[in-house]
Amino acid sequence: MLLKHPKTPHNNDELTGPLCPVVETTKATNLRAQSFEAMPQLKISVWQKILCVVIIPLFFQITFLILLSTLLKQVEQENQVYSKSKDVLLLVNRAQISIVRNLSFMLTRDSKDPLRYANTDVLTSDLRKVMAVMNTQTDLRPEVRELLKSVPHLYGSIILNVENNRADFLAHRLSKRGLDEFQGRMLPLMFDLQELSTSMLRVDADLKIAAPEVLRRSRDQLALMLFAGAALSIALSFGAAFIFFRDIVERLREIDENARCLAMRTPIKPSKLASDEIGVLAAALENAETSLTESRRKEVAIIDVATNVLLSADRRYRITAAGGASFNEWGFESDELLGRSLLSLLSTESQKDFRATLERISQLNTDAEVESSVVCKDSTVKDVVWKIRWSDNTYYGVAHDISERREAERMKQRFLAIISHDLRTPLSSVSAILSSLAVKVTGFSDEAKKIILNAEANLDRLMDLIRDLLDLEKLEAGKVVLELNCVSALDVCNAACDSVEFLAKSMGVTIVRSHGDSAILGDERRLVRVAVNLLSNAIKFSKRGSSVTVSIANLGEQTKFSVSDSGPGMSREDQENVFNKFTQTKTAETSSIKGTGLGLAIAKLIVDGHGGAIGVDSELGVGSTFYFSIPNFVETDE
């Protein structure tokens, strides 16, 4: 703002006077910020920081232990000095006592008494030992060293006088005058010994007072050093942890907040750029956020363009999210559905079963499919099938519109009803009339009879188609109840062969029957129909003069029926589709063979209802083998 003022100079050098304190403050702040940003940052990894936190206190503790051991050594040395000083004083004191005792003995004896110098050697030897010890003991207390400085000279004088006096005595040169002179020389020495003893007593008393004080002071120093060392070690540990871990904690807190934002689907905050482990983790989190954002964008786009209605609801069935397909399918905008009860979208007849399904899903924590009717915004009703999953206290559902399929099923039911009631009955009457005309009525020309026979054959095929359609519908709808009993596999085979025997003879085909047998669990009438269907197909596609072989094989738990022919065979594609409805092989050799295309589909449904399996092995130009297996009958103790 100051730079835009008309009176404010544009030259930065002019903004330094007392009239521009705000500008100076701003510049100083910016400079401090730039200086802080320009400061070199400690770029080390997390494990290196942890290593520093461990090494710094450890280094201090090692240094502290070295200092502490040095101090202990000094205290021990000082204690040894006190101990040696006292030992030397004690030794000198004993020598003093020996000198006084021996000199007193020498001075009180008669000058001619031979026992006068009996202990002279012991005295001089002790004194020399004391002098030798004093020469070796250099680490003594200063006052003791000062006190004993004159001892070697004093003891040397005593030794010299005593040994000279004894030598004169032994040489018989000791006179009364010599003895008086000896006593005169020894008397000052005795006074010196007395003064030395007095000084020793004083020094000994001072040592007894000073030694405990020194030890106490050393003990206090050790305690103070231990306390200071422990405090400093703790301070270093916390300081290093604060310096090195503060940044780690702050960045981990940022990562935690970003992770929460990521879970709540809110934008995350940018993290500090770093090359350590936490920086890698933060970068991975940002990459994950980018990937999730892109994934959510694609997910929303897919949901919006999906033809099925996708939505979620909470435990109380209130809709929490809905896809854009709700408008195209039901006429409701996504926002209109939010907060609305899911049950309110359904017709009254569907709500009870739908609620029971939702409760069962939440209790068992599973998935389920349920059909219902949805009332659209324009009051029209659509049939939908729901695929619902329960997860994280939320229902996730996909609604697929099956209105067209339901309408097709209703049309199919109406068509089958027309076939069953309105078409089959009159066709049966026409078939009976044509049969009567072909057998009983005379007077027709051969051409007319041929037309009547062709009409009857076509009508029979139409009746077979109607029967197959009705049977197929019943089987697919599960309306056929199989009467399972212990059945002879050979009886099923013979009954089927007998049924197609006339057809086989008319087409010049021989049926080779099986002689094996086993007890199977099945509906005999339905199984005969399956075998008849396979046999009739094999006969139709076999050449005149060929044979069709029927075999029965007991496989232990199941019995396998096989029908083999030497017909034209089938391609791999035809084998995969041969059991579908309205499917027939398409080759030049089989194009003239007519059929409904429902027989094998019906056979498959019957075999599946028995818990068995049906299939075909075929090779073009060689022939085909159709087979089906049925579980064997197992007796149980009731």
Image: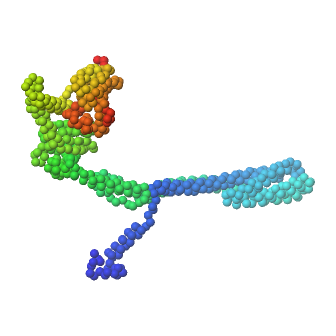
Task: Reply above or below: 348 against 190.
Answer: above
Considering every residue shown, the one lying at the far right of the view is 172
Query: Residue 615: which quarter of the image?
Result: top left
Percent position (x, y) of residue 230? 50, 54
**Residue 465 image offset from top left, x and y in percent:** 17, 32
Q: Nearer the viewer, residue 284 or 127?
A: 284
The quadrant in which residue 629 appears is top left
Q: Quadrant of the N terminus?
A: bottom left
Picture quarter with the C terminus: top left
Q: x and y percent of residue 264 in the render? A: 28, 52
Question: Could you tell me which residue is drawn at 74 percent across and 54 percent down?
Answer: 133
**Vertical side of 515 occupied by 380: above or below:** below
Residue lying farthest to the top in this orientation: 638
Q: Could one spot residue 495 in this view of the protein?
A: yes
Nearest the viewer among 161 and 291 is 291
Question: Residue at the location (68% across, 57% down)?
Answer: 140
Asked if residue 614 can be seen in this view, the reply is no
Residue depicted at 16% across the width and 50% down the height: 328
Relative placement, left or right, of 338 versus 193 is: left
The total number of labels drawn is 0
- Place residue 577 in its image quadrant: top left
Q: In this view, does 267 lie above or below 593?
A: below
How is colour applied across the structure in the image?
Answer: rainbow
Where is residue 73 shown, x and y percent of the image? 62, 54
- Front residue of this view, candidates 455 and 247: 455
Q: Which residue is drawn at 83% across and 55% down?
A: 162
